[in-house]
Amino acid sequence: MSNDLLEGILEIRKYPDPVLKKVSETVTVFDSELADLVKVLFASMHVHDGVGLAAPQVGILKKVAVVEYDGKSYVLINPRVIDQKGIQEGEEGCLSFPGIYANVTRPQWVKIESQDVNGNTVTFEGEGYTARAFLHEMDHLSGKLFIDYLSNLKRNAIKKKTAKHTGGHF
Ligand code: NI
């Protein structure tokens, strides 16, 4: 495993890191490096006690994410929603926004078409919190963040809270 990938286990990119707003590239090569990336994502997610993690959050702009909830693990590679039903509102957080939570409205149930680490097409379904996790991670792959669903007022309050101090006060 390369050093860049190992560093990814230790460091989760935090907002406003610009990498979080970028669109990830479609995965076209299904090699050992991709398998390593998936391992790093699971390891990082476990270390940081998350239910999902997307590659851009460890600084890698590839359409790869993992979700683990209710004893089930999912690998999302080039994922897309092929069906959805219902609506749910619930609290959401993100490892890139420590300590920040907000209500986000999402579909209640989704069916996802994805690829596995070998490039095979797979489909899986998620309901409730699992659906929310899939959609949150898939948004990361398009550079979309959960605060983008909030009102300007709420979003600006979060931006202020997460702003990095880059200089002194004059
Ligand atoms: Ni997130």
Image (cartoon, rainbow, N blue to C red):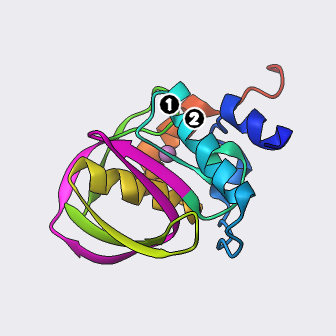
* Residue 66, magenta (yes or no): yes
The residue singled out by tag 1 in the image is 46
Question: What x and y, as percent, mark residue 119?
Answer: 57, 73
- Residue at x 69% of width, y 76% of height: 28
- Is residue 161 positioned above or below 105 on the image? above
Q: Amino acid at mark 1?
A: His
Q: Secondary structure at mark 2?
A: helix
Quadrant where the C terminus is found in the figure:
top right
Report the predominant secondary structure element of the magenta stretch.
strand
Question: What x and y, as percent, mark residue 20?
Answer: 64, 52
Q: Amino acid at mark 2?
A: Ala
Quadrant where the N terminus is found in the figure:
top right
* Residue 14, magenta (yes or no): no
Residue 73 is at least partly visible in this image: yes
Question: What x and y, as percent, mark residue 142?
Answer: 57, 66
Residue 96 is at least partly visible in this image: no
Mark 1, Cα crowd under 10 Å, few <14 / some 14-19 / many 20+, is some
Q: How many marks?
A: 2
The residue singled out by tag 2 in the image is 43
In the foreground, 120 or 68: 120
- Residue at x 67% of width, y 33% of height: 9
In the foreground, 130 or 136: 130
Q: Is mark 2 within 8 Å of ligand 1?
A: no
Magenta region: which residues? 65-91
- Residue at x 45% of width, y 34% of height: 50
In the foreground, 20 or 166: 20
Cα–Cα gap, marks 1 and 2:
5 Å
Position of 101 compared to 91: left or right?
A: right
CB within 8 Å, label 1 to label 2: yes
Question: What x and y, as percent, mark residue 10?
Answer: 69, 28
Quarter where residue 93 is shown:
top left
Q: Is mark 1 within 8 Å of ligand 1?
A: no
